[in-house]
Amino acid sequence: MNRAFLLNIFLLLFINLLIKPVFIFGIDLHVQNEVGSDYGLYFALLNLAYVFQILNDFGIQNFNNRNISQHPHLLPKYFPNFLALKLLLSTAYVFLTLLAAFFILGYGRAELPLLTILLVNQVLVQLIFFLRSNVSGLGHYQLDSFLSALDKLLMLGTCSILLWVEPFKSAFTIEYFALAQTIALALTLFIVYGLLRRKVRFSLRPSWAGNWKAGKPAVLFLLRKSVPYALVILLMFAYSRLDAVILERMLPDGKVHADVYAGAYRLLDASNMFGYLFATLLLPMFARLLRHNSITEVRSLVSLSFKLIWAGSITLSAAVFFARADLVQLMMPERASVYRSDILGILIWVFVPVCVLYIFSTLLTAHEKLGPMNRYFIIGIGIDLTLNALLVPTYQAYGSAIATLSTHLFVAGAVAWLASRTFGFKASRRGLLQVSGFTAFVLGFDWLVFEKTAFAWPLQFGLALLAGLVGLLLFGLFDVRAARRGWLQRY
């Protein structure tokens, strides 16, 4: 399984590195610079849509991915019922989010059209994720890798037309940007559905009163089985996405500060993409190994994935931290400020605990150890709300950034401890020395390069990334010989 993981994670990273950064920094960043503070409203509404995501997905993606990985033959029986359930939940999601936005948060006619488009986009995103969970659950990891960036590839086309082709260019608004994403997501949905139909034959007629023992699960039964997974999603989105909404609503000029926060959060979001790719690949793999009670292989896969994601997160976070002022100047030359770069300097370190959380929360999800994990997420929400309430009125976006980092550090540490206790993981002295030695090496090297040399900052940034690769090999976090042996055995 380690061999399959390495092959597919490198494929996933390669494909997504080709496409997604181009969208984030070529399209999304250009839009923010075009529309100004309106992007702060867009970002706050997008995070509001994320907070209510529980109604949209309800844990179906993870529940389905885990179960199809362990029982692929059940896909034709599961699919029509899950699809019917998702359509019902998506309708409730759009309706209830709009009600909450209007009656509780005070958004009005000026904001609700944009929010509606964003909600439709989230419905399409979750339908795509559901279809892809079936593809990866069947073991088609490479196909799923190619599909993972298809939506962003299509968005490059639709959004580019609006930004650089007349008459759309001169009349461009943030609503047009959201609609361009809608078109790309709808095309992606049809493509993924068509590919899945070529892999498996299934009906689209749901069973509302099925017989689970006979292998015909009813829609309502599946809804009950998805509840624990839904709670995981609700709590994770709540403590990680509330900050922008609180910031925009709490301060008189909240839209301006949310715009600053969004500019820094963009790099964190772009980085988090890599952690999410690890999670989507690991969930079906963990599920299959646990079904066969292959605990030794589980531990080996956890160790390998943790070392790789730790090395990547530390390397990227440190490089961005030291180059934060230059990166903000590059992304927003007309609006660069110390305020923006300092927010980025705090937020980018959230990437490290997020990556740790991706590994261990995915393992616990595959093991259905959801209740204990959810308790730590609830505590995380309390920490996040408390810190935001205390810090935002005085420190504005600084307060939100500090609250976000503190919350993620607590949650990641707690979930890692829970996974270690559940599976009996014990960090070896050698492993601890490898991880700590790598971290000290990267931080020390980056400090020397950025603070003690006069190189141009792009060269400094490149050397910082190179230091991560050298450290990965130097401290033995990645065994090249073992990987080469696995590759030769496969081919």
Image: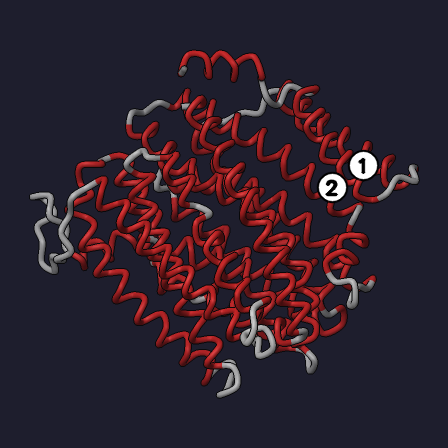
- Residue on which the image places disc 1: 446
Q: Position of residue 216 (x, y in %)?
A: 11, 48
Task: Give SS at disc 2.
Answer: helix
Quadrant housing residue 282: top left
Query: What SS does tag 1 mark?
Result: helix
Name the one closer to the observer, 15 or 429: 15
Q: Earlier in the sequence, mark 1 or mark 2?
A: 2
- Residue furthest front in the image: 166
Residue 168, percent from left and from top: 54, 74
**x and y percent of residue 211 in the render?**
8, 50
The C terminus is located in which quarter?
top left
270 left or right of 212 in image: right
Q: On screen, 377 above or below 181?
A: above
Q: What amino acid type is highlighted by mark number 1?
A: Asp
Q: Residues within 10 Å of mark 1 (few under 14, many from 20)?
A: many
Label 1, label 2: how far apart the Cα atoms are: 7 Å
According to the picture, the residue beneath numbered tag 2 turns out to be 318
Q: Is residue 417 visible?
A: no
